[in-house]
Image (cartoon, rainbow, N blue to C red):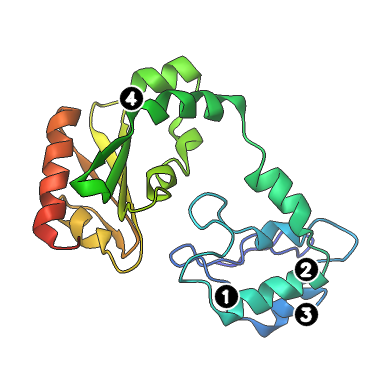
């Protein structure tokens, strides 16, 4: 949904399901939706979701998206400011949490599956919340040879939320669907009950059975 402030400034020009810009040609023009070249208003719609979509690098970034981004820059959006304040600035709790999560890294299936685990204790020790873990699932995915990345995050009720990411045509939505979850080809999620070791074994078995690797 597109919403505006009382001054008419566009705050959410993205479709939340695909994170594409709405196909509005007037978004490409300087002054669109009240964005002025002498303010930071244009920065707001330009950066998208900072952790899940990483600066227009995924397949759902099309021609219309980049043309709209060009229009926002022409209207005054500052890519350097966005990079410094969105992608390069983190709260201390996030870094503390990351330092406790990275040692949980597990590599399976001949180096093609990587995973990390976040426990409630790790969150409490770091003074962090699940929001601070945004983007952690991408660390195993960045390892050369890894096709599927999994983040196991323990919830307050003892269940685990599993976030899955993949490269290329590996369909993690199909794998998450086995456990009642869903998503799209390269990003999906599901929830599971049980001990983390048993959950991990069940997930690996589902990956093998899927034939996606």
Q: Is residue 119 above or below residue 181?
A: above
Dividing the picture into quadrants, the one containing residue 130 is top left
**Nearer to the camera, 51 or 156:** 51
**Quarter of the image where the N terminus is located:** bottom right
> Residue drawn 12% across and 32% down?
198
Q: Is residue 136 above or below residue 184?
A: above
Q: Nearer the viewer, mark 2 or mark 3?
A: 2
**Residue 9 at x, y percent in the picture:** 75, 63
Q: Measure how far apart labels 4 and 3 are at the Cα level.
A: 47 Å
Question: Mark 1 highlights which residue?
Answer: 22
Q: Residue lying farthest top?
A: 125
Number of the label disc, if any, that sits on residue 73: 2
**Residue 126 at x, y percent in the picture:** 49, 19
Does the CB distance between marks 1 and 2 fall below 8 Å? Answer: no
As helix, strand or loop, the secondary structure at mark 2 comes to helix
**Residue 190 at x, y percent in the picture:** 25, 47
Looking at the image, residue 167 sits to the left or right of residue 195; the answer is right
**Nearer to the camera, 141 or 6:** 141
Question: Mark 4 highlights which residue?
Answer: 119
Q: Residue lying farthest right?
A: 38
Upstream in the sequence, badge 2 or badge 3? 3
> Residue drawn 51% across and 67% down?
15
């Amino acid at each position: 949904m597109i919403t505006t402030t009382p001054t008419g400034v566009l705050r959410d020009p993205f479709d939340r399901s695909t994170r594409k810009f709405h196909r509005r040609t007037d978004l490409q023009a300087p002054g669109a939706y009240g964005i002025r070249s002498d303010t930071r208003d244009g920065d707001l719609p330009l950066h998208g979701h900072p952790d899940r979509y990483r600066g227009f690098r995924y397949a759902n970034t099309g021609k219309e998206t980049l043309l709209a981004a060009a229009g926002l820059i022409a209207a005054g959006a500052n890519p350097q400011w966005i990079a410094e304040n969105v992608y390069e600035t983190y709260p201390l709790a996030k870094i503390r949490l990351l330092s406790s999560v990275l040692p949980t890294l597990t590599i399976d299936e001949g180096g093609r599956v990587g995973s990390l685990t976040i426990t409630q204790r790790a969150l409490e020790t770091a003074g962090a919340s699940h929001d601070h873990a945004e983007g952690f699932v991408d660390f195993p995915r960045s390892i050369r040879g890894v096709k599927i990345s999994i983040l196991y995050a323990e919830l307050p009720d003892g269940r685990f939320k599993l976030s899955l990411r993949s490269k290329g045509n590996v369909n993690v939505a199909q794998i998450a669907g086995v456990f009642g979850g869903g998503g799209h080809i390269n990003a999906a999620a599901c929830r599971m009950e049980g001990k983390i070791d048993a959950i991990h074994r069940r997930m690996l078995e589902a990956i093998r059975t899927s034939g996606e690797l």
